[in-house]
Amino acid sequence: MSILVIDVGTSGVRAAVVDDDATIRFDVRREILPDSPLPGLVEFDATQMATAVLDTAVEAVERAGDVTAVGIANQRASTIVWDRAAGDPVAPALGWQDLRTVGDILMLQAEGLRFSPNATATKAAHLLDSVDPDRSRDLCVGTVDSWIVWKLSNGSLHVTDGTNAGVTELTHLGEVVWNPDICDRLRIPVTSLPTIVDSSGVVGEATALPGAPPIAGIVGDQQSSLIGQGAVLPGLAKITFGTGGMLDVCVGPERPAFERRSDNGSFPMVAWLADATPTWGLEAVMLAAGTNVEWLRDDLGIIPDAASSHDIASSVDSADGVVYVPAPLGLGAPTWDFGARGTLLGLTRGTTAAHIVRAVLEGVAMRGADLVDAAEADTGLHFESLRIDGGMSNNPTFVQALADAAARPVERAREAESTTLGAAYLAGMASGTWAGFDDVAGNWEPAETVEAAASVDRDRWAEAVDRSKGWYEDLSAITF
């Protein structure tokens, strides 16, 4: 029994076939990059995305011969508006990083309404204002999962799951249903929004694919990674170190007490929805992780590729006093500061490229430990170990630095892209491949466990972070 997983990320599409032993047999990939017509604007061609999804999915099904079900994992909060009858987008889709609605958000704050620039709510309102100012057209509003399900079902299904609905900021705080008051204020017709369904469960057939397999799992990418790493019991946490860094922890049936962002900079989230009931989680975010390694490679040119950062960094025993705060886009949890910037401290005439590379890897690791501190403060939990995935999880120097910074074991996932496994588990539970979350938890087996081997000066690190703050005062004054 094999599961087809369609994983739609920020920079590409992956269609993978996962067997019933939770191994990925093969995958098919297509690069799909967003556009940035102006600083702060991020948009993409939803038709191009759909074409890439169908092409990779059809190829994967044909290679597999047969699949039992389809699971979908996706970048969250990116927003698409399309014509219900024609099935075509009516404007460029807005990526989750897009900041064009910041002015609208500040005006809404004056009314006592709080929205995040990365959430769906104001993006959807902006698109509707642009293409349907009098709200007379029959349009569909959705996130990437909604759009992909629509295309896979040839327009017969307009749905989203609880993990994706939960980050739109269009639902009630304590339950995963659309909030008509918020929708009315933003002039988003509730009839344009998708039906909210369970994260695991058959919602219909993917008639656009050979054999019309059932669509049986839908989940946002970070929640999918949480599930894919088997962290489905309260108190288990994972961090994904990709372009950015996301710590997610399973909390349980009770929603975290704070309304939106806590004093420690983390957010409540729906970990998954089952029988219309959410299991809650919590998320802490760093805005730039692998981006810093890309900077070393593409802009400074001091490493030829990302993988070589380990070899170069490990050529020296330490960073020799050099400290790097990875804030090229600002700081996330625990202290959000959009005006902070990347900071390199402790340089001397003896500083080499290897010292700088090591300082960058250690700086990302220290920020990972910051996320752990924030999440533990907000949940009252202590994470006995950390499960990690993402591209940086394959870097031994970085993984050791993380174990040292967090002062606990780090368990590296066998599959660096655990989002694929999470969506496969959800679809597989709905189709009988796995019995439930106990099976998912029992399947976790790390590729390796790295123990802390050295102590680090976290107080000195906090001083370095403080020096990075407030570089652009106007941006630092913005809060959401």
Image: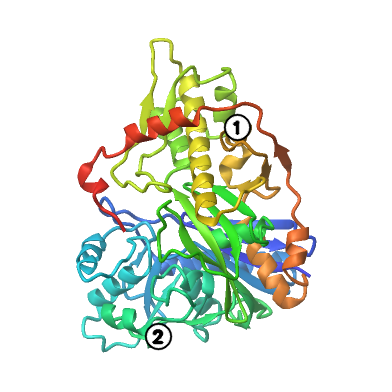
Identified by mark 2, the residue type is Arg
Q: Does residue 216 appear to the left or right of 131 in the view shown?
A: right
Q: Residue at x 51, y 31 (%)?
A: 362
Q: Nearer the viewer, residue 42 or 183?
A: 183
Nearer-N-terminus badge (1/2)? 2
Where residue 322 appears, as percent x and y from the top left, is 44, 21
Q: Which residue is mark 2?
A: 84
Q: Is residue 340 visible?
A: yes
Distance Cα–Cα, label 1 vs label 2: 53 Å
Give the class, few, some or many, for how many residues have Cα within 10 Å of label 1's Cα (few <14, many ≥20): many
Quick check: 138 left or right of 404?
Answer: left
Q: Nearer the viewer, residue 331 or 370?
A: 370
- Mark 2 surroundings: few (<14), some (14-19) or many (≥20) residues within 10 A: some
As helix, strand or loop, the secondary structure at mark 1 comes to: helix
Q: Residue at x 41, y 82 (%)?
A: 193
Residue name at image x 42 percent, y 76 percent: 171
Q: Where 477 sits versus 196, above or below?
A: above
- Kindly report which numbered mark, 1 or 2, lies closer to the viewer in this rendering: 1
Q: Amino acid at mark 1?
A: Asp
Where the C terminus falls, by quadrant? Answer: bottom left
- Dot label at residue 132: none
Residue marked by disc 1: 404
Q: Residue at x 26, y 63 (%)?
A: 101
